[in-house]
Image (cartoon, rainbow, N blue to C red):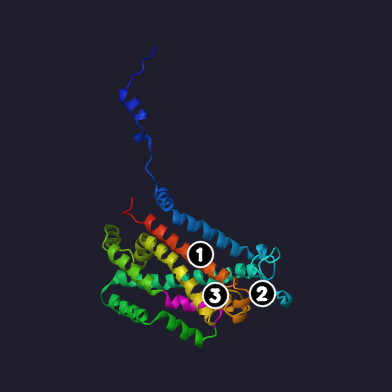
């Protein structure tokens, strides 16, 4: 009969849970840290609901956003009009859904453009340094020194405001924060061993910037983008409130809030102003909550 050799160490290996346990992946660590922040999770859920509602607005909305009913203007909330009607008899709930589409489109589109401009300028300045860095950063300082709201009002006054023009305007006025942040990340990363090794083997600067350094700087960029979306939505609402944003009859939360400031509306339907204002407040707060959660989750120094 064949005899098997008994190795007591094998039993210890099987019984030791620390040896069998696999190390956490970066994705699991990220989600563990993010879900620990209850406000961030709450903000992400609410944002998901708002974004899906805006995307599915044609399917969810009970009416056409441009349909008027002057016989039913400034009607209070009811079973037919869940949030009431505005001064032209248009359903407020429907216009909130379609207005969310415009406000979110301006927010995401502007941030995408701002990230493209800011990341490119910040990456070039941080990687090359020297005179190039000095010239680009002085240009950034000049843009930052101009009050943003006055710059926006001036540009919008010159060019007839529309959704595509607003996206372009916000993009060219919101990239400076991203540029300075990316520059700082590149100044720190360009001296790392993997970058020096890439230079040694003759890798082109463009490939080093976009294939080696930029992926390692994506964490702060994502956090900045999340916070910037809320800022742009708030700025768009401010311009629309002043009559310089998205023009009626196209609904946006900002021009709905401006329309609600009519003296007659304030007297007969004081609830009207609360709904678009509440949507702006909730959306911006949730973007800030998610941004804070992402910052904590992507922090390598955190637990």
Q: Where is residue 174, by image quadrant?
A: bottom left
Dot 1 falls on a residue whose secondary structure is helix
Instruction: Report the label total.
Output: 3
Give the Cα distance between marks 2 and 3. Answer: 19 Å
In the image, residue 209 above or below residue 259: above
Between residue 13 and residue 232, name the one nearer to us: 232
Magenta-tinted stretch: 161-174
- The earlier-in-sequence mark between 1 and 3 is 3
Q: Is residue 87 visible?
A: yes
Label 2 vs label 1, nearer the camera: 2
Q: Which residue is mark 3?
A: 254
The extreme top residue here reads: 1
Labels 1 & 3 near each other (Cβ < 8 A): no
Dot 2 falls on a residue whose secondary structure is loop
Q: Which residue is mark 2?
A: 74
Residue at x-position 36% and y-position 59%? 216
Give the Cα distance between marks 1 and 3. Answer: 14 Å
Q: Which residue is mark 1?
A: 282
Q: Is residue 165 visible?
A: no
């Amino acid at each position: 009969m064949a005899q098997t050799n008994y190795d007591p160490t094998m039993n210890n290996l099987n019984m030791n849970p620390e040896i069998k346990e696999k190390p956490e992946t970066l994705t699991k660590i990220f989600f563990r840290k993010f879900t620990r922040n209850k406000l961030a999770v709450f903000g992400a859920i609410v944002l998901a609901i708002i974004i899906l509602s805006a995307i599915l607005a044609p399917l969810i909305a009970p009416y056409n956003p441009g349909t008027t009913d002057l016989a039913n203007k400034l009607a209070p909330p009811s079973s037919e009009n869940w949030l009431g009607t505005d001064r032209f008899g248009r359903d407020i709930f429907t216009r909130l859904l379609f207005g969310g589409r415009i406000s979110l489109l301006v927010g995401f589109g502007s941030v995408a453009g701002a990230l493209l401009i800011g990341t490119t300028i910040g990456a070039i300045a941080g990687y090359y340094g020297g005179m190039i860095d000095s010239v680009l950063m002085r240009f950034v300082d000049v843009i930052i020194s101009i009050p943003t709201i006055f710059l926006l009002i001036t540009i919008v006054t010159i060019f007839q405001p529309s959704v595509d023009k607003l996206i372009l305007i916000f993009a060219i006025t919101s990239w400076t924060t991203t540029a300075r942040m990316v520059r700082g990340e590149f100044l720190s990363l360009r001296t790392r061993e993997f970058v020096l090794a890439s230079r040694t083997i003759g890798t082109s600067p463009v490939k080093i910037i976009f294939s080696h350094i930029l992926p390692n700087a994506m964490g702060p960029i994502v956090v900045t983008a999340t916070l910037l979306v809320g800022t742009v939505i708030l700025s768009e609402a401010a311009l629309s409130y002043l009559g310089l944003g998205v023009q009626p009859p196209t609904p946006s939360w900002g021009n709905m809030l401006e329309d609600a400031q009519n003296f007659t509306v304030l007297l007969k339907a004081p609830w009207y102003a609360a709904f678009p204002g509440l949507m702006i407040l909730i959306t911006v707060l949730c973007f800030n909550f998610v941004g804070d959660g992402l910052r904590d989750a992507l922090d390598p120094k955190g637990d």
